[in-house]
Image (tube, rainbow, N blue to C red):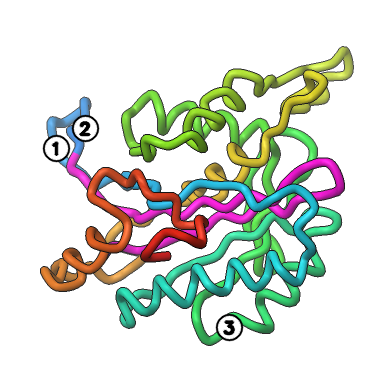
């Protein structure tokens, strides 16, 4: 089982909480300058879904904990990472997740700021929505994201269509779903899950254990069609 990164977009009054689970793998790609090859990250989305609108933060924390526990149950040696939108109301949720899940995973706060920048600051990530959208577009165009064939993935495609990047007269960049009645929670959760490349210099590569692969496939389906957030489904 590859490195697992979970993206969590914490919902508010009118927006549901969204969770995306990405398994990070690698493929070789050619460098155009010298014809050499180098590894690049590819992301298989093992789960993508929303919690019901109005789900309280204690239940959000409980459901995320369930996901992380089941990831560890499939592969006890995996060191998953949870990237949490800690902007605004998300900070208390991040604090509780870090306190509760520190033994299961690394919990990283991501705070959205104005503009299109990306940086590591104070033990967390600061980024603009414009950066997140641009990265998602680049990964999708480069066929580096494998999405499940689910209704949630179709909703995500609609969100990406509704996503806009605007620049006002003062050169201020804003991004998001501006149309009335639209949401960007799935796109945000996915963007957080695939935000960072994982290269050999940043984590140790192990040969996939056949028993772990069989357990993963049995839990979620080879075609990634099972929603891991569905309580009636097996696996996560």
Check disc 2 and report its element: helix, strand or loop: loop
Q: Is residue 5 magenta?
A: yes
Mark 1 touches mark 2? (CB < 8 Å): yes
Which callout, 3 or 1, points at the residue further toward the start of the chain?
A: 1
Q: Residue 86 location in percent, x, y?
A: 74, 59
Instruction: Residue at 85%, 55% (x, y): give it.
Output: 88
Residue sticking out furthest to the bottom: 103
Residue 34 versus residue 208 in the image, above or below: above
Name the disc covering residue 31, or none: 2
Residue 13 relative to residue 229: left or right: right
Q: CA distance from mark 3 to mark 2?
A: 39 Å
Q: Is 52 in front, or is 47?
A: 52
The magenta segment is 2-28
Residue indicated by mark 1: 36
Which callout, 1 or 2, points at the residue further toward the start of the chain?
A: 2
Mark 3 touches mark 1? (CB < 8 Å): no
Residue 43 visible to the viewer: no
Q: Quadrant of the N terminus?
A: bottom left
């Amino acid at each position: 089982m590859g490195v697992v990164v979970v993206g969590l977009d914490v919902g508010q009054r009118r927006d549901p909480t969204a969770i995306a689970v990405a398994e990070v793998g690698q493929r070789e790609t050619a460098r155009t300058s010298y014809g050499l090859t180098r590894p690049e990250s590819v992301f298989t989305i093992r789960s993508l879904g929303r919690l019901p609108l109005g789900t309280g933060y204690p239940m959000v924390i409980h459901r995320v904990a369930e996901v992380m526990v089941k990831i560890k149950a499939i592969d006890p040696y995996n060191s998953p990472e949870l990237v949490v939108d800690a902007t605004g109301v998300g900070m208390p949720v991040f604090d509780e997740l870090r306190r509760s899940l520190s033994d299961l995973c690394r919990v990283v706060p991501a705070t959205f700021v104005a503009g299109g920048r990306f940086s590591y600051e104070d033990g967390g990530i600061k980024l603009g929505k414009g950066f997140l959208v641009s990265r998602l577009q680049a990964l999708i165009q480069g066929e580096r994201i494998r999405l499940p064939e689910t209704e949630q993935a179709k909703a995500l495609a609609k969100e990406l269509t509704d996503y806009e990047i605007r620049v006002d007269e003062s050169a201020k960049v804003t991004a998001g779903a501006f149309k009335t009645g639209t949401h960007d929670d799935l796109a945000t959760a996915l963007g957080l899950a695939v935000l960072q490349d994982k290269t050999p210099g940043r984590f140790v590569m192990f040969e996939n254990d056949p028993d772990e692969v069989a357990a993963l496939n049995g839990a979620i389906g080879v075609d990634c069609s099972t929603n891991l957030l569905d309580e009636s489904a097996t696996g996560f």
